[in-house]
Image (cartoon, helix red, strand yellow):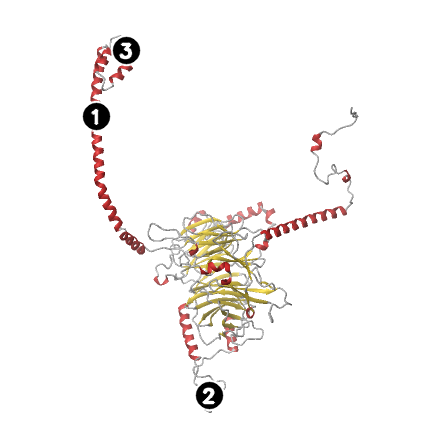
Amino acid sequence: MPVYIRKTMVISPPSILSRMSDDEDDYLTDPDQIRDLLPQPYRMINKIIYNLFDDIWEIISERENARIAEASRIKPPKYECAIQMQPFGQATCLSDSIDGRYIFIGLPNGLAAVDAMTQQTVTTWEDDKIEVTQMQVSLIGVQTYLLCTVDDMGVSRFFAFAQDRIHLLKVASEQGGSGSKTIITKCQASTEGDFVGIVFEDTSNKETWIEVQKLPRDDWLRELEATSKKSTSQTKPQSPAPLGDDSDAPADGEQLPGEEKMIDAEDAEKEEKQSVGQRSQSPTSSRGAMSPVPPGGGGSSEKMHTKFSTPTLVVKIRPPADITGCNASTPQQATKLTDTGEVIGSGSNHSLTAHHLENRKAVFDYFHEQHLRYLPKEEESAQQPMFHFFTAGRLLPTGLDMPGQEGRPSSIGVWWVGGTQVFYYSLVKASKDIEHKPEFVSPHSDVLTATAVSQCTSLLAVGLKNGIVVIWDMHIGLNRRLINLTDDATILKLVFLNPNICGQDKVHYPPYGTKTNSYLLAWCSDGSVYLVNCGMGKTSQPITVMPKMSDQDNLPTMVEPVNGVPEVILVVKRNGTAFLLDVTKGNSLPLCQVNLPTTHELTTPWDPVITVGGQGHMMYLKASQKDPSEDYVPNSGMSSLFVFTLRSFPTLDDYLRRQRPDIPYVIHNTVDKRIETLLKERINQQASRQRRMQERWINLKNELDIIQQIKDTNKRNADLRSEYVSVIVFKLSIIVSIFVEHIDSTTNFNHSTLFKNCMHPLKPLTVEVDILH
C-alpha cells in the first residue's frame, strides 16, 4: 500500500533527538513544564523542600548501610560479670601499682589504697578540701610506693604508701607576687623516684616553666622505716592496771607514755596555710556524712609529727625564646657572633638581622593578605611541656664517669607542644645557675606531637605531625628507624611494648648479643593503630592493629597496654564501648568487650576513669547511672566503680597463663665483656680447630701429588712447543732463501698454498721446494 507524505512536513534528524537532555525537568522531554506552575516565593520553597528531602534520604541510606554492616559484622564476645564498689563511686582518677598489688584511687576528699585482687580497702588518707585529679605511682622500695598527685586547685603533693599506711611527704606549691597565682598542671617522677618534674603555670601572664627536683629517696625510705617502727611500738597492747589503782592514770588532756602526739585540725590548717598559702588542710581521721571514703574495710592514715626530708631543686627550665634578629650592624660582625658557642639546633645561632626578618614578614603579609584575614585568631594559652628522664649513654654522655650514677637518670629531655625541637638538660652537672642552657638540641622536620621512652630509657620514639615516627638508640647515639605511618593524620600516642612478644633475631657472630627487637605501638588521629618493629636495620612494614575510622563515634579515646599482658591493649571509644585487643594478630577481631549493666554507662568516654590491675587479672572502671530516678541497687548513687574479673573471661585464659621470659629492650655489652665472650668462644672452638687440622694434614699428600702431576704435564707441553717452534723457524728460513733466489723469476705460484704447506710441521720440505720451482 502506498504511503503519502506531505511535502511541508519536517522530520527532525536522529542527531538532534540523540542530543536531547535526559533531565526530567527539561521542557523538551515534558512539554507540560514549559511554564512553571508555581509562582515565587513558592517555587523557592519547593526547591528547599526537595533539597531537604534529598539530604534526609542520604542520611537514612547511610544509617541503613551502617546498620546492615553492623548486623553482618562478627561481634566479639561480651561479658557482664561486674562487681560494684559503690563507696568509691566518686573516684576522680585510678592508678595501678607497678607490681599489680594495689589500686590507688583519687577521691574528692583524699586518697584510698585498695587490694587489686580482693577489692579490700587497705588504708585511706582524707582531707575534705582536696580533690585529687592526677596521680602517678612509682616503686621506690620493697612494697614502698611514691604517689605524685595534683589536686583541682593546682597543688601537688608527694605521698608514700608503706606498711599499709599513706604518709604525706611533701607539699609542692609556689606562689607568685601580688596579683598572680601559680598553679601546678603536671607532676611526673622518674621510674624509681630519683627525680621529679613539676610544671608550674602563672595564671596571670600564662607563663609556664618546669622545675626538676631531686628527691631524697634513700632518706625517705629510712624515715618511713623509723616511723613504721615507732608506730608499731605504740600500738602494742599494755597490761591493764589493777582495779582501784588510779595513781598512774593520766589526767584529761595528758599524753600517755610512748604515745605519739597527733596534729589537731587547727594546727594542721595553720601548717597547710603556711606551706600552700591559700589552701587549708585538715588531715584527720574523722569523716563527714557525705564523705565518699568507705567507712570500713581499712584503717585511715593519720598525719603525725614526722618531718621528712625536703627535695632539692636541680634545674629550672623555661620555654625557648622566640627567634629574634642578630644585633650585628655589619655582615662581618654577624659572622663573628654566630660562633659564640651557642647550642646548635636551637635556632638562635644565626646571622639574620632584625631588619631582614621584618622585611621578610612584610613581604609575606603583602602577598598573602587576602588569605591571612581568614585565619582564626589564636587565643593566648600557656605552652605545655612534655618531658622524659634518661640514663647516661653515648648520646647523653654526662654521668658516664660517675660509678654511683649508673642506672639512675642523669638527663631530662623536654619538648614543648607546638615545637619542633627536643632540649636535653643535664641533672648531674654542677652549675651555679639553675636556669642553665641545654646540653644539646635535637631538631626535627615537623611539629612534635608524641614521644615515648622505653623502660630502660635506651630507646626514644618521636612522633611528628606529618605522620613520621623516628626511633633513636640513646645508648649508642644512632638512629634506628624512620618510618612514615600515615600521610593524612598525626601521631597522638606512642608506647613501647614488652620485647618478649617480639621475635628475636639469632645473633651468630659476634657471639655476644648487641641488639634485640621490640614493638612500638602508635596511635594516630584518624583512629588507626599500628605496630612498628624497632629492630636495628629492619625494613618490615608496620602491622595495622586497627584501621582508619570514618565514623566519629568509633574513634578511640584511650589506647593503653595492659600491665602484665603485653600482647593485649585496652581500647575505649567515644560511644562508650571498651574492649581488649590482641596487637600481634593485626587487624583482627577484639578478644572481648566489657559490658556494663543496662542501667549504667561509662563516665566521660572522652576521658574515662579506667585502669587494669593485678597483672592483667582485674579491671576497674567508673560508670554513671543512665536514669537517676531508677536505682540499680538499694541506696546506690549516680556513679559507681565497677570491677571486672578478667581471669574469668574464657578468651583471655591463654594470655593470662602464658609464661613470658624477661627480655631487655636492648643489649649493649662493655669492652671487657666482649673480650671475655670472644675468648670463651675461642676456647670452645679449640676441639673443632684440631679436627680441621688433622683433616688438613690427611688431604695434604693428595694435594701435593695432584700439584706434581700438573707440573709434569706442563713441562712436557713446554718441550713439545719448543720442538714445533724450531721446525717452523727452519722452514721459514728455507722459504726466505728460495724467495731471494727467485726474486726475479716471473713464474706464477700460489702464495697462500705455499705458506700454508710450509707452516705445517709434519709435511716434507720437498713439497714446498717443488711448488716454488
Residue at 78% x, 27% y: name it.
9
From the image, state whether disc 2 or disc 1 is nearer to you. Answer: 1
Q: Nearer the viewer, residue 384 or 628?
A: 628
Please state the total of marks drawn on the protein image: 3
Q: Nearer the viewer, residue 207 or 427?
A: 427
In this image, 551 relative to 209: left or right?
right
> Of the residues under marks 3 and 1, which one precedes in the sequence?
1
Residue 251, above or below 646? below
In this image, 675 relative to 584: left or right?
left
From the image, state whether disc 3 or disc 2 is nearer to you. Answer: 3
Element type where label 1 sits in the image: helix
Most extreme residue toward the top, as rendered?
746
From the image, state whether disc 3 or disc 1 is nearer to you. Answer: 1
* Residue beneath disc 2: 249
Residue 174 visible: no
* Residue beneath disc 1: 720
Give the CA separation, mark 2 to mark 1.
133 Å
Residue 485, above or below 88? above
- The quarter in which the C terminus is drawn is top left
Q: Position of residue 250 (x, y in %)?
A: 47, 87
Residue at 56% x, 73% y: name it.
291
